[in-house]
């Protein structure tokens, strides 16, 4: 769904609007899934730290994408990445449950690949039928790493979600993506991307949000350790 919404709406909305809608929905989904105990061993209620951490991550995203923000007559398309974010937030929980039930991470990875491949193939056939298909493949080798890295991401999220919860996983992922983006832009200036001051500020906000979200779990672990002693 994320890949489909990216292809269908990112160019019309702009990357800024697309990323903001997607990540905001991911964090909202993480809050809800943790609250109802989906994909984790016990429910995680709404707390000041958890809500504040999610807010920091959303604000961080707005900061980072603000230099490219632009108005669009197709703003209604933001529903697509928002819906994709809500569904993607449930994905690690579902993958974790499947892996637990089958005893193999490969089952959830394989089904993710099959479903994604089927949906994208249908979309490709529709574009071919409408005559909108172009087959200009990128000439840069690292642009083909998306598939393998995506599979690794699915596997890692399914493993980590049970211990971290969906919200903490989402906030940490947001911080990691923003930090990685800044490092790539700084280390590879030949790509032509500018690192703005608000980009640095946004990344710091995301990291702070990730730290805030871990406070309840850190306190709980400390209390458990003290009780054990």
Image (spheres, helix red, strand yellow):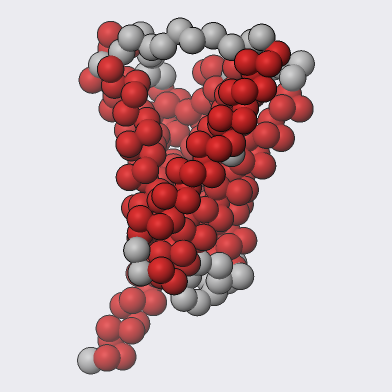
Depth check: give the residue in front, 36 or 58.
36
Q: Picture coordinates of residue 215 (x, y %)?
A: 40, 64
**In the image: residue 160, left or right of residue 15:** left
| Number of dots carrying numbers | 0
**In the image: residue 187, left or right of residue 178:** left
Task: Determine which quarter of the picture holds residue 46.
Answer: bottom right
Query: Residue at position x 34%, y 21% from top?
Result: 143
Q: Picture coordinates of residue 74 (x, y %)?
A: 74, 19
Depth check: give the residue in front, 103 or 216.
103
Residue 51 vs 17, above or below: the answer is below
Q: Picture coordinates of residue 93 (x, y %)?
A: 50, 61
Q: Can residue 149 be seen in this view?
A: yes
Task: Determine which quarter of the picture holds residue 222.
Answer: bottom left
Q: Picture coordinates of residue 67 (x, y %)?
A: 52, 18
Task: Determine which quarter of the picture holds residue 158.
Answer: bottom left
Q: Is residue 21 visible?
A: no
Q: In which quarter of the image is the N terminus?
A: top right
Q: In which quarter of the image is the C terminus?
A: bottom left
């Amino acid at each position: 769904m994320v890949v489909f919404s990216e292809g269908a709406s990112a160019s019309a909305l702009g990357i800024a609007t697309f990323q903001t809608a997607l990540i905001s929905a991911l964090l909202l989904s993480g809050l809800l899934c943790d609250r109802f105990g989906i994909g984790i061993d016990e429910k995680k209620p709404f707390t000041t730290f958890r809500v504040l951490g999610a807010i920091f991550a959303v604000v961080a995203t707005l900061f980072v994408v603000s230099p490219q923000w632009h108005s669009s007559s197709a703003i209604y398309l933001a529903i697509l990445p928002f819906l994709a974010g809500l569904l993607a937030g449930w994905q690690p929980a579902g993958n974790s449950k499947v892996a637990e039930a089958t005893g193999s991470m490969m089952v959830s990875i394989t089904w993710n690949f099959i479903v994604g491949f089927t949906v994208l193939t249908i979309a490709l056939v529709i574009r071919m039928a409408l005559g909108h298909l172009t087959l200009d493949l990128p000439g840069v080798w690292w642009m083909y790493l998306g598939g393998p890295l995506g599979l690794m991401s699915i596997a890692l999220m399914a493993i980590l979600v049970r211990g971290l919860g969906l919200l903490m996983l989402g906030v940490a992922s947001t911080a990691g993506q923003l930090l990685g983006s800044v490092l790539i832009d700084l280390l590879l200036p030949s790509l032509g991307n500018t690192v703005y001051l608000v980009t640095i500020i946004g990344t710091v906000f995301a990291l702070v949000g990730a730290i805030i979200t871990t406070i309840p779990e850190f306190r709980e672990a400390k209390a458990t350790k003290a009780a054990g002693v």
